Amino acid sequence: MQDIAVIEDPAAAEVSLDPIRTTILRELIQPASATQLAVRVGLPRQKVNYHLKALERHGLVELVEERRKGNVTERVLQASAASYLISPTALAAVSPDPHRFSDRFSAFWLLALAGRMVQELGKLITGAAAARQKLATFAIDGDITFSSAADRAAFAEELGVEVTRLVDKYHDGGESAGGRRHRLVVALHPALKTSDRTTTHKEHGND
């Protein structure tokens, strides 16, 4: 089971967004049969089987084992990942293009960059897994409180200067043999208010 699977196929994305199937995927973090799932989600086994077949057809769940019980073979399934993320590739015709924006203070440009990151990382993770190689990545996540808009603007300006200095120091403009181009994205945005975070958790069924 992967930690996170990035869904790129539009049909798989459509299948995953069904509320019942989302519930089934959540329950299948641990292997279970259709009979066991039916009890957990409160649905008839036949209906659970219908949804399981759709999820399995798109690679969202996978067979763990088959158990013989009398004249019946019980199939035990598990979700292919603990979590799922839908890539902008699934909506390729209308996905945001970072090249359409040029304002580094634009929230829409930041969103387009985030979408591109999901898309590219999904492909990189798939490729690394197929090659059985480790993917070299690095990220920083933290909170900072500014006392004023002026301080925020000053911080952004200084951060830009420092990042540019580091890029100039380490960037191999000639891309020498063995060199690998990397994507660098630095983001700053307001944190959600406590009430917003609570609402988001409730909408996703979390406490």
Image (cartoon, rainbow, N blue to C red):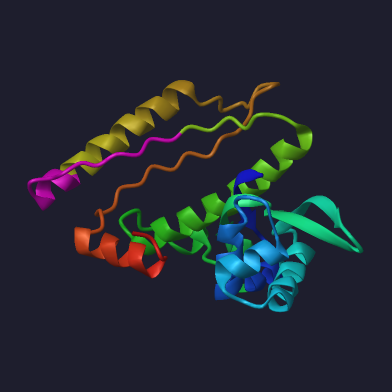
Q: How many marks?
A: 0
> Residue 135: where, in percent of width, then height?
62, 32
Residue lying furthest front in this view?
A: 70
The residue at 56%/59% (across/down) is 26
The residue at 53%/50% (across/down) is 117
Magenta-span inclusion, residue 140: yes
> Residue 100: where, in percent of width, then height?
48, 64
Residue lying furthest left in this view?
A: 147
Bounds of the magenta segment:
139-153
> Residue 108: where, in percent of width, then height?
39, 64
Does 54 sit left or right of 24 as displayed?
A: right
The residue at 81%/59% (across/down) is 74
Viewer-nearest residue: 149 or 3: 3
Is the residue 35 above or below the residue 136 in the image?
Answer: below
Does 95 sit left or right of 195 as displayed?
A: right
Is the residue 186 above or below the residue 19 in the image?
Answer: above
Magenta-span inclusion, residue 63: no
The residue at 37%/32% (across/down) is 164
Is the residue 23 above or below the residue 147 in the image?
Answer: below
Does 119 sit left or right of 190 as displayed?
A: right
Is the residue 125 above or below the residue 204 in the image?
Answer: above
Viewer-nearest residue: 132 or 171: 132
SS assignment for the magenta stretch, majority: loop
Q: Quadrant of the N terminus?
A: top right
Examine the rendering and report whether any part of residue 18 can be seen. Answer: no
Viewer-nearest residue: 49 or 191: 49
Does 199 sit left or right of 85 as displayed?
A: left
Examine the rendering and report whether any part of residue 107 can be seen. Answer: yes
Q: Quadrant of the C terminus?
A: bottom left
